[in-house]
Image (cartoon, rainbow, N blue to C red):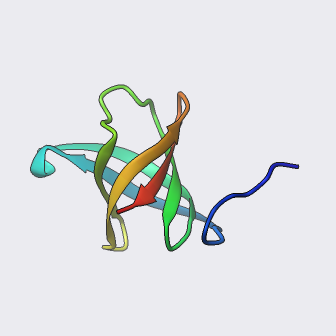
Amino acid sequence: MTDDHRSAPRQRVLKGGRIVINDGFSTFQCTVRNLSATGARLKVAGIIGIPDSFDLVMDDGRKFACTVAWKTEFEIGVHFA
């Protein structure tokens, strides 16, 4: 069992979204795997080219300014700014 140090509980979700950089000129498709009031876990095709801060625009219209907390080859954990 892993220790959960998050300040807010995460809810499992499966929602589409886009990582938006360069004032909207560049986007990366992603899937939001879990979500809380303070952050999210994103599944991506690959992390190459994704900076340490970006906007997350979800398919339902919600938008979050994000800072990367951790990343693996195909997943990114973010804090909402």
- x then y, percent, for residue 10: 63, 67
In the image, 74 versus 67, the foreground residue is: 67
64 with respect to 78 (left or right)? left
- x then y, percent, for residue 42: 50, 49
- x then y, percent, for residue 20: 24, 50
45 with respect to 5 (left or right)? left
Instruction: Classify 48 as above or below 77.
Output: above
In the image, 66 versus 44, the foreground residue is: 66
Q: Quadrant of the C terminus?
A: bottom left
24 with respect to 31 (left or right)? left
- At 55% from the left and 31% from the top, the residue drawn is 72
- At 13% from the left and 43% from the top, the residue drawn is 22
In the image, 5 versus 64, the foreground residue is: 5
- x then y, percent, for residue 23: 11, 51
In the image, 18 versus 6, the foreground residue is: 6
- At 44% from the left and 30% from the top, the residue drawn is 46
Instruction: Classify 37 as above or below 25.
Output: below
The quadrant holding residue 17 is bottom left
Q: How many marks?
A: 0
Instruction: Classify 12 as above or below 53.
Output: below
Instruction: Classify 47 as above or below 19.
Output: above
- At 37% from the left and 50% from the top, the residue drawn is 67
Q: Residue furthest right?
A: 1
80 with respect to 43 (left or right)? left
